[in-house]
Image: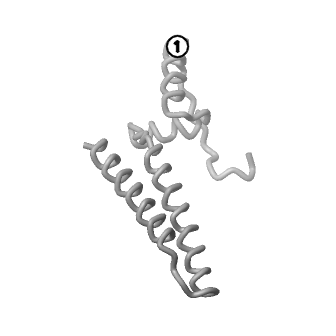
């Protein structure tokens, strides 16, 4: 414990039912670290758990588009012409991004 930043230990006695309830709430928040959970609850009184699945999907799509744009830029720098298929690929990817954004915004309401 000499290297720890937090040197004060708080202990809270609970019943078996209370412990099970705490563990259920930790599962809902996808956390196994009781100390972090308890500290956050004691200080703030609540934890906001956000589902970022849609945002992660959007980020993956944006990364794919970035790769495509880099490939097109490399081709332009080395060969010169832009192909119609490249432009259509970019338009399709942008359409997917707009659809994801609309979905995310509508689900947040």
| Residue denoted by label 1 | 15
Q: Residue at x 47, y 72 (%)?
A: 84
Q: Residue at x 59, y 37 (%)?
A: 35
Residue closest to the far left: 109
**Residue 7 location, x and y as percent?**
64, 46
**Residue 45 location, x and y as percent?**
38, 37
At mark 1, the secondary structure is loop
**Where on the picture, by quarter, is residue 23?**
top right
Q: Residue at x 52, y 13 (%)?
A: 15
Q: Nearer the viewer, residue 51 or 76?
A: 76
Q: Residue at x 43, y 46 (%)?
A: 54
Above or below, 62 relative to 80: above
Above or below, 20 relative to 70: above
Above or below, 88 relative to 56: below
Residue closest to the far front: 84
**Residue 82 location, x and y as percent?**
51, 80
């Amino acid at each position: 414990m000499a290297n720890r930043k937090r040197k004060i230990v708080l202990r809270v006695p609970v019943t078996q039912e209370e412990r099970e309830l705490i563990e259920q709430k930790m599962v809902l928040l996808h956390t196994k670290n009781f100390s972090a959970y308890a500290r956050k609850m004691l200080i703030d009184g609540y934890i906001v758990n956000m589902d970022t699945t849609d945002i992660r999907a959007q980020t993956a799509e944006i990364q794919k588009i970035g790769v495509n744009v880099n490939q097109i830029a490399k081709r332009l720098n080395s060969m010169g012409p832009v192909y119609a298929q490249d432009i259509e690929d970019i338009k399709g990817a942008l359409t997917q991004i707009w659809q994801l954004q609309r979905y995310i915004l509508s689900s947040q309401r």
